[in-house]
Amino acid sequence: MSEYLPLVVLFILSTLVAAIAVALGHLFGPRRPTERKLQPYESGMTPFGPGTRRMPVRFYLVAVLFILFDIEVVFFIPWAVVYRKLGLFGFVEMLLFAGILEIAFVYAWKKGALEWE
Amino acid sequence: MVPIYYYIALSAVLFALGALGVLIRRNAIIIFMAIELMLNAANLALVAFARLHGELSGQVFVFFVMAVAAAEVAVGLALIVKIFETKQSIDIDQLNLMKG
Amino acid sequence: MWADRLAVLPVIVIGAWAVLLTVADLYIPEHRRRITAILAALGLIVGLVVNLFIQRHNPQTAYFGLAIADGFSSFLNVLFLLSGLLGIAVAHGYLQRQNIARSEYYSLLLFSISGMMLMGMAADLIIVFIALELLSIPLYVMAGFHRDRLDSEEAALKYFLLGAFAGGFVVYGIALIYGATGSTRIAAILSAVQSGSASPILLTVGAALILVGLGFKVAAVPFHMWTPDVYQGAPSSVTAFMAVGAKAAGFAALLRVFLLAFPTLSDKLVPLLWALAALTMIVGNIVAIVQSNIKRLLAYSSIAHAGYILMATVTLGQSRLMADAAAAALFYLLAYLLTNFGAWAVVIALEREEGKGLSIQDYAGLGKKYPALAAAMSVFMLSLIGVPPTVGFLGKFYLFRAVLEGGFVGLAVIGVLTSLVSAYYYLRVVVVMYMQEGEPVVNRDALLHWTAALSAIAVLALSLFATPLFQWATQATLYAAQ
């Protein structure tokens, strides 16, 4: 366990430092709240309407398409790592894989899933 | 080194939590999240075992589980959204149209 | 490399066809939807021909031992492709009558079939999982295909949640088995189990979890709760397809994984399998008695039949018998395929909009007004009971014989007694058709009527040629990929 001791010390020290910094700010910092300062994004856009209202279903569609294409990238990484070892076989297989993804993309596109308006 | 059994125990706890969640919770989204928890418990076990055996196929399997889970999310959320549009509720106890 | 592709060519054909059909469909105009159905059927026929040509007796592994092509997978491929063809035949007119004719149906059907075929070829637990999801995910969508009707949506959501739940069990079971043996290859698992290097606790728990997951898929009691609701709510053409296809694929995995990988665990697993089979037969048949909706009746009937097929798995560990029992299960699945699709064709012929025409009372007078249809339905009911001269009788005969040879007299007795119980509710349909007066309404749909008629003829005729058929199933021996 001894090799973990530095880690433990680091963890305790960092917690302490963070706690002290927050505490000092609380103790000595001046507090003059204005309406503007209490907004969720102080320097950002002025919020309109409650934050929990319903999202249009469009967001959902785009999000799901994103997840699907995003997660497929996971297969490219191990492939890229051993690309040279796999040679032509790996290249052809990945071409097929990407081709099928492309077809799915064309399908989503033609069905109008990517139209925003 | 953290012993392998810790990982397995953690994954077993996560799996049990997920399975219990499916059985206890009534909200379709929460049930679905519990199922995801089960899958990720299995992923944790697979990675831990892959490390134990010094072999990679467990890690490869994790990739497949993740990809399949994403496909399930796409279909499952579509179904849940559709039900919510019609019923304004995703409480599975209210899904009782059919009785024998 | 080419040998690998050749070995799994049937799956590649169907998978590629499904992908291309999805694209081609974008360019087929709305009013020509029939073309999509014909193209899908053509793909299945091409798959059948390919499967016939590359059928082999010595097993061939592919892709580093991930997949295996042997007699078992060839036989199952025929089963799945046939169920796809029948699935299209019963769906085409039905989808139009129900106003849900969207051509994605056929692509989804093909995707699901490619998953089922992959399941038959699985030589690695990773493939078992991927195939399970590949066949299930399209089925979730198809179950909810009637998207303006709440019961269809409800069925889809229930099927999805329980299917994903079952998938979780399968993955965790696989993870534990991987932990115990250090491999996901079925052959490697077997050698690790036989050498005794695997932890027996992890192995048994893992096998039990996979059994739970697959139990959901094949609708075995006590994992059957979803079945009646899903079968009732889903569009009838989808129900017909999933009652056969998904069940057969679940059993393919069950037979391949359990009989091949875990023969040494038989002392722990056989009591479990025994109880599962007995419970499934008893509950399925007894609850079916009180059903008044024909779709629910067939749902419970499908549960009961899962129980009969499960009997084949209790021969686990008796190596000489296992081949026979697996062959009997394959034969039973084929018999169930023909009988079930025939019965569903009749149900779909009588189903009208808004879910009318599905009560058993709606069948009153069918014998007088539509004698051919009523006769076909009677044949299917007799085959489901297991009365000679139908193929259902022979399916039960081969199964019971294998179970008796294995020394499981108690289980066989339960099987016979529950079959007698089932005669009550199947014959009630026949009685209503012939003995009661009524004005049944039947849809005009030539394809549907031909499907029913040809299935009825096949159910009768194949009982005469059962011996060569059973021999074909016997040759379809299971192999573990090396």
Image: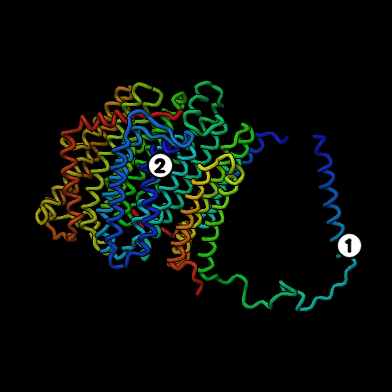
Is residue A94 depicted above or below A24 in this figure?
A: above
Q: Nearer the viewer, residue C451 or C413?
A: C451
Image mark 2: chain:
C
Label 1: which residue?
A: A24
Label 2: which residue?
A: C118
At 85% from the left edge and 52% from the top edge, which residue is drawn? A16
Q: How is the image coloured?
A: rainbow
Q: Amino acid at mark 2?
A: Leu
Is residue C329 depicted above or below B85 in this figure?
A: above
Residue A48 location, x and y as percent?
64, 78
Is residue C26 depicted above or below C266 in this figure?
A: below
Q: CA distance from mark 1 to mark 2?
A: 64 Å
Do circles 1 and 2 both sit on a common chain? no
Residue C247 location, x and y as percent?
35, 42
Q: Amino acid at mark 1?
A: Leu
Disc 1 secondary structure class: helix
At 31% from the left edge and 26% from the top edge, which residue is drawn? C324
Q: Nearer the viewer, residue A35 or A105?
A: A105
Is residue C208 depicted above or below C89 in this figure?
A: above
Disc 2 secondary structure class: helix
Q: Nearer the viewer, residue C99 or C76?
A: C76
